[in-house]
Image (cartoon, rainbow, N blue to C red):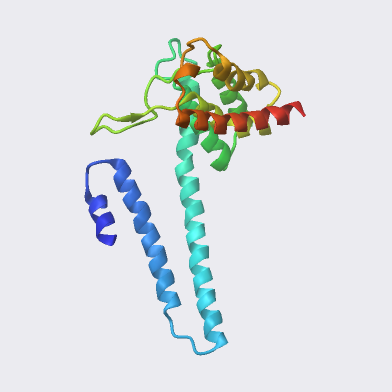
Amino acid sequence: MQSWWKKASASPKSRGTRASARFFEGGAQFFQKLRRVYKREVASFDDVARVLRAAADIWRDSSSNVRYFLRTCSQWGTTELFRQISLFNTEYQTGFDPGSLAFSLRIHHDFGEHKADQLMPLALKILMKSQHPDGTWSTPSPFVLDPHTGSGVYVANLEIANAVLRIIRNTQPYEYFPNMKRIYTVAPTSTMRVAGWKKPSTLSANWTLMFGVFTAGGVKVISTIVT
């Protein structure tokens, strides 16, 4: 496996592959350190205690590094959040993407160290204002695009809703209750062909399962608001 991730790391094929390789490289280094510690000779309980303390130090250092990288990487979410808010307030809203707004808002909510008091309520307000009457959002571009293959990942409307469910529940549940109720009740029961949704007659088993998972989350939030 070590030769695989070295090859993947050097490959220019895709940024995602290189990122995955770096992840596995970091994991390999961590487990190699643990392996060296656990291979030490032990002849007494004191030796066992020293080995366990050394292993605990490795786990603690690794945890500290993870927290540091999370703080560093999550800064992108706050920067993107400001950018999407700015794009929404331009005349033609060129480049505004509700999917990017929702995910950057969730990143900022979960990992941001300095949460601006007015930033999250403003972002939520913009996201709900950009929602269509059928409970969907327009996503003009893929959330992730591979420039080499042209393949992209487009965000589903349920993923946008799921990204902000916890934020709404913890901050402004009553204000956005109609928006959440719309996406979790109107869309799945409608027999009309509305934007962003499949007709009930064409729902596959996988789609139904996925919808059930997200609907369960929505019902939980809605029930929390009502009670």
Q: Is residue 124 left or right of residue 169?
A: left
Residue displayed at 48% across by 35% down: 77
Residue displayed at 57% across by 20% down: 183
Q: Is there any visible trace of residue 82 in the rendered image? A: no
Q: Is residue 108 left or right of residue 28?
A: right
Q: Position of residue 164 (x, y in %)?
A: 57, 30
> Which quadrant of the view contains residue 96?
top left
Is residue 29 depicted above or below 212 in this figure? below
Q: Position of residue 198 (x, y in %)?
A: 46, 18
Residue displayed at 50% across by 71% down: 55
Residue displayed at 57% across by 37% down: 109
The N terminus is located in which quarter? bottom left
- Count of labels in the image: 0
Is residue 70 depicted above or below 169 in this figure? below
Q: Is there any visible trace of residue 56 in the rendered image? A: yes
Q: Nearer the viewer, residue 118 or 127?
A: 127
Q: Is residue 226 left or right of residue 207?
A: right
Q: Position of residue 136 (x, y in %)?
A: 51, 18
Q: Outermost residue toward the right?
A: 227
The C terminus is located in which quarter? top right
Q: Position of residue 209 (x, y in %)?
A: 51, 32
Is residue 14 depicted above or below 7 in this figure? above
